[in-house]
Image (cartoon, grey):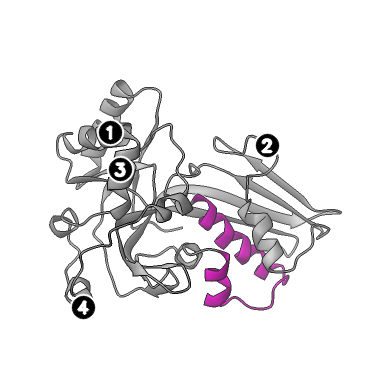
Amino acid sequence: MTKDFYSIKVPAKINLFLNIINKRKDGFHNILSGITFINLYDKITIKKSKKFILDYSGEFKPKNKYFEDDIILKTMSILNLKDDSKIHIKIEKNIPTLSGLGSASTNAAAFIKCLNFFSLIEKIDENLLSFVGSDVSACYYSRDCLLKGKGDIIDFNVNFPKIYILLIKPNINISTSKMYSKIKNFSNIKNNKSFLKDKFILDNLKNYQNIFQKIAEQEHPEIKNLLIFLSKIENCVFSRMSGSGSCCYAVFREKKYAINALKLMKFSYPDLWSIIGENKIKI
């Protein structure tokens, strides 16, 4: 890879659980979330160019030239990079947007890595990553972790089990900020230290929750119905929604069970996007 060209693929994130502890004085929320990454990737390529170009391709590219509140343009603005920067950015969108899979955050993290490669930014620190977006720090490292604070505190002292996941996205797009605005009750975690000492084995993970899930189920009954359907699939350990949604998933101990589940899903919900993935991947 030369200094004229840089390419990187970035994996989707899955929230195995997501708790909101309280609301902070600065308007953000303190969270506690377990995140793992799977083999579903966006690909970002940057090369030197005579002018600034941002091209999207893939199944989940924007309907217009750019996304609304485009994370790449936002990152450039934060870094004081002008749109006359002589780079050509190509992004292949395979991760669904507005799905709770970190589609925008993974792109921002990869873009920052590319800018660093081209020496367009001098250094990368946690303040920069978290300023761009709460999940960007976690997506930058793409490792199992616990997210704390407003999402800017990362604890890598965690090892989630190997799992196989059936992912399915309803034809619903959910705004993260809108979901946060609807939080009225906080997670009932009276003793964070006790929670964090828990062993994150599958039999324990199935007892956790995503606090956004109940809100999404109330507003979109199809999400509730889908999660019930997933939970009843043979050999499903648990089903859950990732992040603020709308992507839902079912967890299996073995790949063969996930493959069988995907066949059932394609038959039962032929019009919805669905795939199988796994964590503990090498990028």
Q: What crowding class fits label 3: few (fewer than 14 Cα within 10 Å), some (14-19), or many (20 or more)?
A: many
Q: CA distance from mark 1 to mark 3?
A: 9 Å
Sequence-wise, the earlier of marks 3 and 2 is 2
Q: Is residue 122 magenta?
A: yes
Sequence-wise, the earlier of marks 2 and 1 is 2
Mark 4 or 3, closer to the camera: 4
Give amino acid for label 2.
Asn
The extreme right residue here reads 50
Mark 3 or 2, closer to the camera: 2
Q: Is residue 61 left or right of residue 158?
A: right
Where disc 1 sits, the SS reads: helix
The residue where tag 2 is placed is 64
Where disc 2 sits, the SS reads: loop
Q: Which secondary structure type mostly characterizes the magenta part of the structure?
A: helix
Q: What crowding class fits label 1: few (fewer than 14 Cα within 10 Å), some (14-19), or many (20 or more)?
A: some
Name which residue lies at 71% across and 63% down.
77
Q: CA distance from mark 2 to mark 1?
A: 30 Å
Q: Which mark is residue 249?
A: 3
Q: Could you say where residue 235 lies in the image, as x and y percent from the top left?
A: 15, 39
* Quadrant position of the N terminus in the picture: bottom right
Name which residue lies at 39% across and 65% down.
143
